[in-house]
Amino acid sequence: MYKLIILLFFHYFAIVAVSADISVVDDNFCVIREPVLKLFSYNFTSLTSTKYILNDEFFNATIRLQLCSPLKEKCNGKDGYAVCLTKNKEEKGIGKMRPKVNIKNGTIMFVFTGDDCTAGTKYTVNIIMKCDYEAENNSHPELFSHTLELCNIYMMWKTALACGPRIKQNCTVTHNGLHYDLSPLTKYSQNYVVHTGACLQSSTGIEYVNLGDVQNPPFITNGALRLEYQDGDLCKVRDITVPHIKTSIFFICDFEALDTVPEYTGGSEECHYRIMWKTAAACSVESLRNHSTATAGKCTVTNPLTNFTYDLRPLMNKNSYTIAKNGTEYKFRVCDSLVNLCPGTGVCRINSHTSMGKANTDLMWEEGGPYLNYTDGDVCKTGQRRYTIIAFVCGAEGSPDGPLIMEQNDCQLIIHWNTNLVCGNRVKCVTDDDEINLSSLIKSTNNYVVKVNKTEFYINICRPLISVSGITCAHGSAVCKTSLSSDNEYVNETSLGFPKESPVLNKNHETVLRYVDGSPCPENPKKLISSNFTFPCYNNDKGFPEFKKYEDCTYIFEWKTSITCGATMGNWTSPCIIKDQLLSHECNLSLLHKNEKIYYVKNKQGKEYSISICGEKSCNGSSVCQGNNGYGSLTNVIFDYGRNVIKLQYSNGSKCGNKNNSYTSEVRFICNESIGIGTPKLLWESSCSAEFEWYTNVTCNCQSSSQQSTAFSNVQDDVRDFSPSHTGAVAGIVLSVIALVAALLYFRDPNKRACLRSCINPFSSRRGSGRVQYCRVNTTEEARLLLDVDPTQCQTDSDDDLLNA
């Protein structure tokens, strides 16, 4: 009996096929070639720039660690160590550079050897690198504390850098008007294990066999939802003609099947492994919605895919809420009836005492969030009963909380309510390897707005849109397309997808973010609209989205931004400006001291640090002090655009201890637009070093010096208009007038006029006098976007030109 380890990521497929026991020692030991298939390399060099501090209060011990390079500070007065143990105020070098790298059964382990531990035994530090696609970009090693008493110390480091590459596949299916989505089954930090009756043993131990790669999205055949993995290892079964092993997974809808695992049903003898999987994720979205409604409680409903329960009873306990729009006020309650005003109803129009719907406790589930539907209100002008929809949204961190009227008319009222009560797990806004972090583009107070003629796109990044009164896209949407009517009202709202996936790197190493499951596609109602954003590296600070084209039910945007440019060094300019060397971005840090000259930070033991980045310096001119000890002068300025962090590194401070060590420090500035100037917090400390993080809006608005003087004049409140410019039209008219005057002066000469006529006459017999104006478009949707296009954007050709095109 053996365990069949199925690497089922559905969105992705990771190759892990390491059966050899291999040791690696070379100068570039942090870049490790996968030893069996040799198709890719594990690259841990990005962990080099950070020093990690591990504290163990029980043993009163601290470990300083730098994985891919030696520690900058000496250990026990000596250089060349990567791991340094401080215990009872005594330093010991327990890990020297370079380590031995062991790869065994798919596990990568760095083994450092240090100084003597006991007579005849040296310290060893074993760092096990564990694949975890969901590991945060500031992940750090975890110490097995009990090993501190031994000479052989172990650590576990969960990181996406220890994972293989992943191939992205769409995980949604539409069949007969029903929609299926298998993405909730995606795992990022472990695999599904399937038990089989076969035995895969070799003379060297366990043999890993590739049972296939995911190459196509799931599909439905004979009424069954199915996913296939193709082109596995060569089939070695006698008399089987198929060249490669493949695997088929058959999904069975079961509303009660949560957190289940797949089951092997046979097929190894014919190189076609068959697996059955009962799961709620195999049910259509429509049937899941009906099931959640049937099983909902009083003002509660459970997400049938994640088992997360939305509980809005805390809102139910309040008497009432009052909201207004265009001078009309409404009073309503959540999951309960009003008492004094419009008794028995859930929503009342105050000025006319009109019922907008009777209250109920039937909270209903939608992918964008739960909602209440109050129906059977008073009769409106059309003869129908009035109703109200109250939709609850998990918005961006720091976004305004509370209800907002999205749409109102005589017969209906739509309210959106941003509340943390409906927040399960938010989408991570970083790539798998933590290389690119788009979190700084998340909007918490307003949306990005892209205008193309009369079409407007409202956009947020990795989060639902900030509610905008009048725009009624499905709540929870990340992108909404709408148009303005002649009455200046929003019409034709279309959802371009929900934030369900983290950004990924495509084959060109470009960052791509995809939103899925939007409104039905106009060309193919069986499909749902999606949108793709590509983020090329560009010297324009955060940048702005630009609509590029529409094809195959997908809206494609490009977002040029410096955030995807990685890290670059910077310089300090007096009095308090930092500027990067690559993109010429500038930040004025003097704004940090607008309210406070000096910031004070205490650790758990009450030891107090003072920080003055731009203000008065004390303790030998250091920006970071603890008592009379200065924690260094500025050594490095690092702009890390991928992680949206600016680092100031200080070294060569006051003497630390009796050895040749000196105090060092680091301050990390992390952009957060909603927090104001913010205050620094202690991230970690050791006997001779301290590191602080500072969430602030001061570093959110760094821009290049050239852009400071040439900023877009039409960009206000994150709105950008890509419609034809009036300025361009005026410039065209001016140039035309100049050309006309020049022509008149030139052709005053009769000989030149005669020459012109002789050039024109040969073409006078052609049908060129009848010219056709046209715009090239690729799809019906692009045609709709360009219906109101400026004629100056179109090309013109004669009839003959068009016939010969």
Image (cartoon, grey):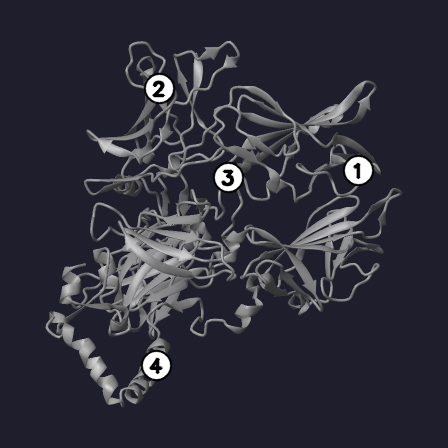
Gap between marks 1 and 4, in whole Å? 70 Å
> Residue 690: image x %, image y %?
73, 49
Q: Are marks 1 and 4 in contact (CB under 8 Å)?
A: no
What residue lies at 19% left-to-right and 81% top-to-bottom? 757
> Residue 39: image x %, image y %?
47, 30
Q: Is residue 48 left or right of residue 517?
A: right
Please say if 720 is above or below 73: below
Residue that label 1 marks? 79
Q: Quadrant of residue 270?
A: top left
Gap between marks 1 and 3, in whole Å? 35 Å
Callout 2 crowding tier (Cα within 10 Å): few <14, some 14–19, many ≥20? some
Q: Amino acid at mark 3?
A: Glu
Q: Amino acid at mark 4?
A: Leu
Residue 735 numbered mark, or none:
4
Residue that label 2 marks? 264
Residue that label 3 marks? 134
Gap between marks 4 and 3, in whole Å? 57 Å
Labels 3 and 2: the sequence-earlier one: 3
Please say if 801 is above or below 34: below
Disc nearest the viewer among 1 and 3: 1
What residue lies at 59% left-to-right and 40% top-to-bottom? 139
Q: Quadrant of residue 230?
A: top left
Q: Quadrant of residue 383?
A: bottom left
Labels 1 and 3: the sequence-earlier one: 1
Please say if 201 is above or below 627: above
Q: Are marks 1 and 3 in contact (CB under 8 Å)?
A: no
